[in-house]
Image (cartoon, rainbow, N blue to C red):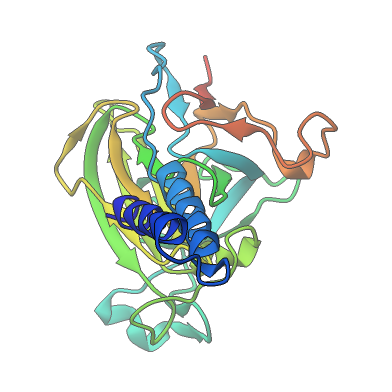
Amino acid sequence: MPVITPTLMGCGFILVGWFVDPLFGLAPAFGILTLMLAAFFANFWRDPDRPIPKEEGLIVSPADGHVMFVKRERAIGRRPSPAEMDDAQEDEFTGTWHQEPCEKPLEFSTEQRFEAVPAGEEADTDVWRVAVFMSPLDVHVNRAPIAGTITRMEHRTGKGKRRGPFLPAFRKESEFNERVRTLFERADGLIVEVMQISGALARTIIPWSGEGDQMRRGQRFGMIRLGSRVDVRVPATRFEPCVISAEADDPKHPKGEFVQAGSTILYREVKV
């Protein structure tokens, strides 16, 4: 409908302007504008097939876009359980946090708060995070980064909001925008956290799968409408990132390496 309706309207206005009355040129001009809108939506809703890598030990990108940053992080807090609310602290924009991470941070059992790890302070409980910025012109269908089971899928918003906040997705602070957090668990117990984050324009995250669904690597599991962002966290001791971020100041990739959902390899497993 977002494509068909403006296409029909555009054709109708152009025909009226051609055969009936151009209305001082407004009818054909409006017709061209609506056809341009239809072309934009057709480009946005496209969902091309992708070659999926078959090699073992890979994690592929769940999204199309440019790599904003690659960071090694450690958990410094978590969402509290009801029994922990008395010891929790409030943040004006991101809600309630317990000041200790999960006992096993790499199980991602609840949403955790992370910070960058200073050089020389690396630990076995660290994670790598790759953030991919999706512009309004990119494909917005998201794909599973690994073959496994969706063990958790939860919707999060800012404190006291039914929806939002909606900061521009290219800003680092947008990680606490309205978001959907999904955990993929591989047969060997590996857990990968994927965060679909809405942007200033993208206000709707649409899951196509749910908890308990078995996913193939590269299988479609949802989409985000218009510009947005997707973050992927994995255990730092088991994987190494293999993409170039915008923060790397690589002259060949000033906006960060462009990655494609299902095809581009974000991480390779470390061989011991």
Residue 109 appears in the rendering: no
In the picture shown, does residue 183 fall above or below 155?
A: above
Please provide percent x and percent y for residue 61. Answer: 47, 33
Which residue is at 42% across, 83% downward? 159
Q: Quadrant of residue 87?
A: bottom left
Say if residue 26 shows up in the picture. yes
Screen quadrant of the N terminus: bottom left
Quadrant in the rendering for residue 244: top right
Residue 58 falls in which quadrant of the image? top left
Relative height, residue 29 to residue 221 (above, below): below
In percent of width and height, residue 105 lies at 42, 51
Residue positioned 30% across, 51% down in the render: 4
132 or 124: nearer the viewer = 132
Residue, x 53% and y 32% (percent of image)? 237
Q: Residue at x 76, y 45 (%)?
A: 247
**Is residue 128 found left or right of 108 in the rendered image?**
right
